[in-house]
Image (cartoon, rainbow, N blue to C red):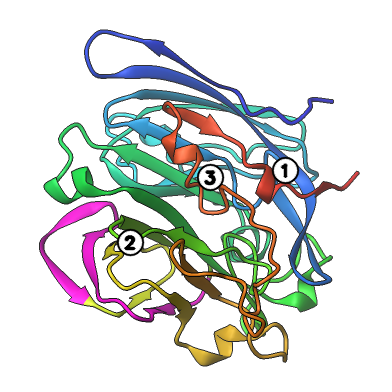
Amino acid sequence: MLTSLALACAAPTLGWAEAHTFEMNIEDTKITLVGKQDFHTFAFNGQVPGPLIHVKEGDEVTVNVNNLTTLPHTIHWHGLLQRGTWQMDGVPDVTQPAIKPGDTFTYTFTAEPSGTMWYHCHVNVNEHVTMRGMWGPFIIDPKEPTPIEKEVTKDFILMLSDWASAWAFKPGYGGVPGDVFDFFTINGKAYPDSQPLRVSRGDVVRLRLIGAGDLAHAIHIHGHVFEVAFKDGRPLPAPYEADTIVVHPGERYDLILRADNPGRWMVHDHVDTHTLNGDKPMGGMMTVIEYTEISAKDDFYAWKDKQFAPDFYYEESLKKPHGMYDAAVFQGQAIE
């Protein structure tokens, strides 16, 4: 049996573009959303969210996808235009046959347009995407960055999702009308098992919000007004200011936040029932912006003793050379 691979190799070609070849396994994996709430997922390289794919506009990308589960899958590259490569769009019975258990399918395409994109399964999306964790970020750097992009000092990816615990260990089922979503996560974790967003005064912060679940989420940030600068990967001709943004399924918004108000500031879904873990409050889709200038050791602070896990928002992987990167913080437990 093939083992989980996370290879990312780039061979320079003439000019701007590079050629990348990646290996991607789909594996039966158990992850923990929060506390003792586990879920059976079909995880890309054993992690939820999947590995970061970070390339440049115009790069040639090849992904060999190995299906190590007992159900069929594909990968749809959400937001990529697939000009001249429509067969690579990843829709079963439309652009390709589904990848059968034990089989491999090779996707080859040009990375365009630039922006915050993502990838996900397109077989039984109601289950595989909604509650089996089959999604990951795909970031394409532009040939010509906008002025605001050149100012960014901190770059974070937040994938928003929702889960119905009734189907946690019933793979092949769920994601149907009438489901009760009772757990809500950022990058596969619910508060307080999520991680802080750590910034310093003067940072220009880019928050890439990706609607990976089945519900809309009204993300509100305390203590700041942010600029909505990109929609679905594209720079807005007239960016606007806000403190709350509704992210629908499949949508991406890139927010620019200027770190000018040191403190500890809540970030949360303002659909209040999405801040529960089951029936327990102060959970779900929540995190905290922590300024490095402010002590995190107040006795009353819920995260005063929290062990920080770097790269929870892919912030470290985004600094690396272009390629594909697994993140240990998202790794689950293999299910044999």
Q: Position of residue 307 (x, y in %)?
A: 69, 59
Does the segment drawn in magenta span residue 227? yes
Residue on which the image places disc 2:
201
Residue on which the image places disc 3:
93
Q: Earlier in the sequence, mark 1 or mark 3?
A: 1
Q: Residues within 10 Å of mark 3 (few under 14, many from 20)?
A: few
- Numbered range of the magenta stretch: 214-241
Q: Is residue 51 above or below residue 78?
A: above
| Secondary structure of residue under mark 1 | loop
Give the residue type that dot 3 points to.
Asp
Horizontal arrangement in the rendering, residue 21 relative to residue 13 (left or right): right
Horizontal arrangement in the rendering, residue 204 relative to residue 62 (left or right): left
Q: Main secondary structure of the magenta part?
A: strand
Q: Is label 1 in contact with label 2 (beta carbons under 8 Å)?
A: no
Q: Residues within 10 Å of mark 1 (few under 14, many from 20)?
A: many
Q: Position of residue 40 (x, y in %)?
A: 79, 59
Q: Position of residue 198 (x, y in %)?
A: 47, 59
Give the residue type that dot 2 points to.
Arg
Q: Is label 3 in contact with label 2 (beta carbons under 8 Å)?
A: no
Give the residue type that dot 1 points to.
Gly
Q: Earlier in the sequence, mark 3 or mark 2?
A: 3
